[in-house]
Amino acid sequence: MTVGLTGDSDYLVSTFKSVVEHIHKIALENGRRHRYANPALEIIHTLAKKASLPLFDAVWINDLLMGAAREKMDDETFTALLRFSAHRKEDDATMDSGIPSGQDCDNVRRDEAKITGFGDPSPEHTLFDQVLRNVGACGAQKDGWQDDAVYGGLVAIRDIPGLRYYLPEAEFLVTLSKAMEKAEAEGENKKGCKPFRVRKAAYDVMLAARDGWLRSPVLRKTLVCLDFPRKLHSTATETFRSDHQSSFLGMMEILSEDRYWHSYLRREMEIWLPLHREGPVHALHILTNVGELLLPGHSNFGVDKSLEEILEDEWAAVPGRPSTELTTGLLEPLAEVTRQFKDLLFFTESGQKAVLGMVERVIPSLESRHGDGYDFLGDGVRRIIDSLLETLREPMPLSSRRPTYW
């Protein structure tokens, strides 16, 4: 049976909140009534589920959880309280994004984030650590991902103000990665699969913390080992919503600003390049960063020029580069993204021919530059160009068609 919330919904919500606050107070006491707190919370949670509508605003429930974490509520009762977090009003979520003007994300460190005042952990950090432990413990149990405490914990983390400053341990990134997987193993039955809302909540945690976590040199090795961008991609594309896919491209753009990620993003172009129409500026910046494009003004393109036209312009400018920019370190990234365009069927037939024509001119043009002080063409540059020419000269298969999302 579903509890109706029409008419007296405000009164019912207020009553729910008052009861939960009262039980929360009892749970923090050491008196005889303490043992009744957890069963009482379970009963109230059952009624909240039957109500089938969000009851609690994000600020209220997070403040309640923060108080519980600060007073060191026992894990069992705290987990019961987390289940109420799953019934928050999503339109009131206090998702935190962006870095304040003048704030350098590279200076964010876990040890710095937990310090406030005289060195005590901030209330937000205390909540963050407590919820991390509970979500990890619940997710590790059989069918634990179905528990409202997991979803409630993830959205509670998502809504912590300044989340980007609280860097998690590697274990939580593993939990977050697992949360975005559809199932634990091949052949797992539907009941054992994770609800989409859990996968999306895990995605939203990273989205809210992106300016701190994705820029952190402390976390990047773990993120690469977990193939984290692919997990984000899987969740963002599952809904086919443009805003989700655009937010994913925005996160990939942040990664592309760090040279550490360049080889990964070139190798895995299939996860971001097909989505370029959902965030053309993001896609352009990613391509510019990971492809080491040197022509000025690329950030102003994208409206009048396609990505393949930008590649054509870049190759046309290669012969005129100063000798310091004619290195294998700068040409190899450009060649690799060009090769990926071909392999991913991103080129149109005319676009491929145009880029091929530009690449064919590179070696002859460089060999003619003796009088300009460029009198040596290294074997590395020849190897890069020859290999790319071999790829571009392969005809497009007649049976191949560019995917409709190009």
Image (cartoon, rainbow, N blue to C red):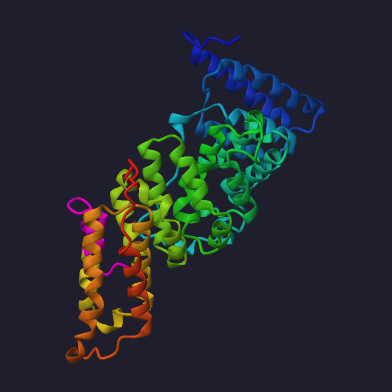
**Residue 216 horizontal/vertical position (percent):** 50, 61
How far from the left and from the top, in percent, is residue 369? 20, 86
Badge count:
0
Which residue occupies 40% across, 40% down? 244
Q: Looking at the image, can residue 298 be seen?
A: no
Picture coordinates of residue 145, whole percent (x, y): 64, 35
Left or right of residue 7: residue 27: right
Residue depicted at 62% across the width and 55% down the height = 169
Quarter occupied by residue 37: top right
Residue at left 50%, top 50%? 230
Figure quadrant of the N terminus: top right
176 vs 357: above or below: above
Residue range (magenta): 292-312
Q: Position of residue 276 (x, y in %)?
A: 32, 48
Q: In the image shown, does 211 or 27 lie closer to the viewer? A: 211
- 135 and 37: which one is in front? 135
Confirm whether the magenta stretch covers residue 283.
Answer: no
